[in-house]
Image: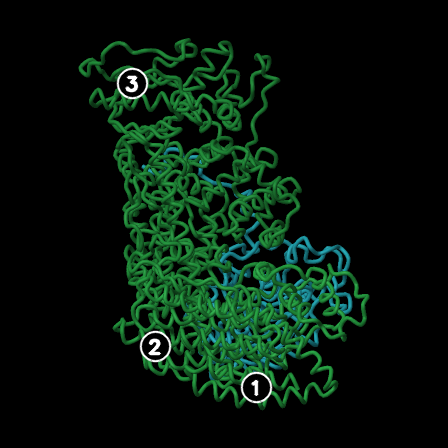
Chain colours: A cyan, B green
Amino acid sequence: MADSTQASAPKPSSSVKLVLLGEAAVGKSSLVLRFVNNDFHPNKEPTIGAAFLTQKCHLPARIIKFEIWDTAGQERFASLAPMYYRNAQAALVVYDVTKASSLVKAKHWVAELQRQASPGIVIALVGNKVDLCEEDGAGTSGEGAGEGEAGGEDDDDAVARKVGFKEAKAYADEESLLFFETSAKTGHNVSEVFTAIANAIPEASLKGARGAGAAAGGGGATQAAISGGAGQESSRVNLTAKGDGKAQEGCAC
Amino acid sequence: MFLSNLVQKAQQLIDPGNLPAQLGLSNNDTSGRPSKAQLFRHQFRLPDTQNPLYEITAELTLPPKSSRTNGTLPKSPSQTQAKSWDKGNWDQDRGPHYLGQLHLSEQFLCFSTVNTSFISTASTSASSSYMFALSITAWNGYEAAGVTEKAGAPAPPKLTVQLEGSRLQCERFCDGLKKGLRQGIKEVDQMRSVAADCYSEFFLHSDFDVETGKVREGADGAEARRAPDTGLGSLFRYPGNSRRLRDRSKMRLWYEYMRENGRNTTLVRQPDFHRLIRVGLPNLLRGEVWELTSGSFYLRLQSPKQYEQTLKKHEGAASLAIEEIEKDLNRSLPEYAGFQSEEGIGRLRRVLTAYSWTNTDVGYCQAMNIVVAALLIYLSETQAFYLLATLCDRLLPGYYSQTMYGTLLDQRVFESLVEKTMPIIWDHLQRHDVQLSVVSLPWFLSLYINSMPLIFAFRVLDVFFLEGPKVLFQIGLAILRINGEELLDATDDGTFISVLKSYFARLGESAHPKSENPKHRAITHFQALMVVAFKEFDGITQHTIAEQRAKHKPAVMVNIESFAKRTSIRNLGPESKKLSANDLGFLYDRFYTVLYERQQRAQMLQAETERRAKAARARGGAGSEVVAPQVEMGRVALGAASSTTMEYDAFREFLAGIARWAVTDSPLSPSTKADFGDSVRGNGSLRSTARAGGRPSVSSSSWGSGPEPADHDFLHRLFGKWDAESRGSLGLQDVVYGLAPVKGDRDLMGSIAWFFELYDDDGDGRVDREGILRMSEGLLFLSRRGVESQSRGGGEGGVEGEEGTQSKDEQFLSAVSAFIRRCFEYADPDHPSRQRHEERDADATNDLDLLDLTESDADATPNPNHHPPPNDAFDQTTPLSPKHLQANAALDPSSPVHITLPTFRMLVLADETLEFFFDSGFANSFHLADAPLPSLIVSSPLPFSSSASATSGGTAAAGSGLGGAAAAVAASPGARISTPISPGLGGAAGTGAAAGAGVMVGPGKPGIRGMLDNIVTDGMRVAAEVRRRMDDAQKELDRGAVPARTGTGGEEDEEDEDEAGDLLDGAEADAGAASAGGEGVGRRGSEKSTVFDR
């Protein structure tokens, strides 16, 4: 996992815009949450529009700062996607290994990216939720896992894999995509995906870190989810409203 | 200060711009201004069923505060104000009074002034009218005073309205009101039960102790009263600290206000009402006031059972929306305790599901789960359902639709407002390539619920429901303004977002923590935000929003449409690769244009019907209103799910735009023709007519501006074939997959096989006699506007080279006639056994005369099952008596013969014209992007005389050709039966010619096209006639053919080939002398017969 401490010798740092695409509830936000915060929430709120987070990835020769655009998965949000994949240098197309239809959707996204996104975009195909498949052994338990992600249709028994490794791999090879199977829940392969992408970004397409304002996060990972960020959720409901009592007279006139 | 503020506020309410955005949206390229009825409904947030019937200037007087006491109301529900009102006596202590307009609709009585608006339901208010004054006592007052005099809710104020106008006007208004009241009496019970869900009914009851917030112990009937459902908050706590929110004192203020100004159905909205809402609603009343200010209460009042009924009706049903809803149930405000319980999740599920069924176009969109979850904290399930409907349909139109066009549009509008009001920030964002909508889209889509801490988001909602969508923009602009300095330091998306995020987290903190003045210190960021939003940006009115929406709408729609088109075409699947990208784009446009135009027409027709109905209802009334609503339902960008498939009629219309033959022979009135040019031009780019030309020229004809499509057996078959999944409708994919083998493969054998399969109904590889006839009809149908030549330039009309086209058409006619004849010559008999018993059957009824033949012919397909099993093995071989033969031929309507694909292929290849047709003609007859169909019907008229000869010639050719074919066939089995049949054939040819002549002089169809049409119509008629006669003749042929075939035995194939060679010669002869077809065919027919006689 990429760490947040600065390496002693300053390495060249460059930022990379990465966009996540894929069907609803395949675990896009969870992958990002695992990568950025090393955390997992079984009931993650659906992303509305998109969320933006950043995380650094330390390679031997340089530091890649990922600017991650995590998009909403529901079909009708697809028309918003061009707004987010515009100028992206990398894309993570995610599907759910327990749901065959999600691979179909992933293929659509790959086709869309290949035609519409910036040329030379690095695309990684990621099959998420392998923890739900017994055979992989990546997940420790199948029961109840990722219910929030996969929705009510998942039984408590281990969910059978619906998309074979070979099938997806063959497709990825054919389209020259990076390919991984991951589990955001267990963390299996998650940082590997990002590292592989970082390595695959051609040197030429790297530009310098954008602006001085990037330091706002205080050296660590800047994360700012537009919606449903993990951190502030508990504060929403029980938020203490200091001074709101004066509201009665105080406003609107 | 407050008053002026509210005066303005109210002006916005009456402002035409303050419209449901949906109407605002349609302004752009449809009717322009919204109708009066729409304005009226929006002003008072009334349901769509209400129309302004009467309107009158009036002065409203509210009772003075001092007079408010329980039980002083009149016992009688009505009280006549006999005293004539004198303005001079009208003094201030009588209570506030307002001058304004009193409106009456079917069920509501509404009063509006410049500085406030109030709604009172007329349906149950008891009142009486005098000449100029009207005293209104609302129903709950009536109940309190008249029925339960002891401990009831306090009576609402008695309102006095003085009407100003002529005596006639006043009387008419009062008559209308009386009528409305009389009808309304029936609905009182319903209203009572609906109002009972309102917390105000419970809370204003006199046994309620405002100080403790509890029902007083020991009060009469207290045990019977239970608080209505005020959302999950009553079970799981309301968000925020109620003491800090000063919930109790707010309740006390509302208690006062409602006692004075009525509640739920009869609430009078005085300036205080707005003020009380601005400071935040108390938890227990929040839901009810949301319902009232948004107007969803009236929706619920109108159909209170809709929610339960919808759930019941669709119980257990599955849909895509439900699948999507299930995915999100566990992740909607998951941090709120209520949504960690089955109770809360269950409510959320039911509300979302019920709405997805009532509005299948929207179904379910992520973000709705969050909004509804928030609503459910304060509202009961039922209330939330109607409020959601109001949100989606009226307040946030298009936000949650399939394409989310409303969301995208409002983002554009927001950006343009930022650009206008904060140019420095805007420039900064542009310079650093930060996309504003990335931040602001979730604000709008989830009404800030997901962005701000909940308690503040609810305060925004309070104002939003009262004042409308503009509030979202005002708040958004204020957020940027307040954070302006920090945002100017941000140079990338990440920083930009984190600035705003930390601001939201600090909303509850003091905005001036270091101030000396304790009052200033007490002001929170949120309060400051509200002040900036509504003070600094009070210039952002609903009107501004509507204007901006209209301005940006076309571009947004085009973007969505091109995205949808791209995606849709890319996802069509591998088969679609057979067609060029241009063609796919063309098909896509054509497909959706047809759907769009059809939907528009349907809507206009419906609107017209409604208008008539309403006009009838409001007959004699003051209001003649209602302009047809111009909502562009069918546009792709609007994402209406209902418009993605074509029914058969739409399919015909679709084909008529890409193939000549699919246009009917009897075009409509000239005006329709004239319009057609437009629509063809529109085909090029999607709906360019609709967009560029302002209002689409939709005629009221059921086919709109396009050519009227034909209806033919061939079209039915084509539709059935393309409808691969037998759904009864075609999607774009079906159309593309249907056309791909025709247009894409360009393979002669493939297209012959394709055509054959079209007629092979049961898929057994054989086409029976009925099918053969239908095939021929189909070929004639396809060719009646001329066969497409191989290379057609894009723009050329149908007139080009009349001579060439014409002779080609004639060739085709004779080719088809030859084809029919040969089909029967080479048709294979069905199983001998079947034939045998049919003969037996026929034998039994050999007394019937020829006249019956035509009738029995009508039932088409052979049904051998009803025949008894064969038991006379020798029947077949014994020579048949002439009489027997004749009767058999006449009576057996379905002597089973069939052709197989190889036979069909051979027959087609035997004829150059047909071969050419299947090689390219048919494929070329579909005009796609490379050669779009020019305006076909309107071709320059030619002198009648010049084509007359051609027509008659053609008719003769057709008539004699077919007649000759029939004669030849008849001749083949021998002279024995030719006598009875020939007269019939002669008759057929005769009628054919006569019919041709009739058509010729009939409808005004000058020009070569008309002539050709006549030829074709004529030919088809002849074919139809001949077809009947052919049945028996052909049977005789069979008779001859069967022994011949049995004789050759296994060498059948070889023989076929021989004959094919023979035929080829004949075909050449045919092609060479088309006009002499009859003769030639006749001759060749007799030659054939010698072969068989051999």
- Measured as percent of width and height from the top left, residue B691 is found at 32, 61
Q: Position of residue B414 (x, y in %)?
A: 35, 55
Q: Residues within 10 Å of mark 2 (few under 14, many from 20)?
A: some
Viewer-closest of A109 and B678: B678
Determine which residue is flagged by label 3: B95
Please tell me which residue lies in front, B680 or B923: B923
Choose the circle earlier in sequence order: 2 or 3: 3
**In the image, B523: left or right of A68?**
left
Residue A90 spot, x, y in % from top left: 52, 74
Horizontal relation, residue B410 to residue B347: left or right: left
Q: Chain of mark 2?
A: B
- For label 2, the residue is B950
Residue B1087: give its label.
1
- Pointer 1: residues within 10 angstroms few (<14), some, or many (20+)? some
Of callouts 3 and 1, the N-terminal one: 3
2 or 1: tag closer to the N-terminus: 2
> Where, quadrant-wise, is the C terminus of chain B in this rendering?
bottom right
Chain of the residue where label 3 is placed in the rendered structure? B
**Disc 2 or disc 1, which is closer to the eye?**
1
Residue at 56 percent across and 69 percent down: it is: B981
Which one is closest to the eye, mark 2 or mark 3? 2
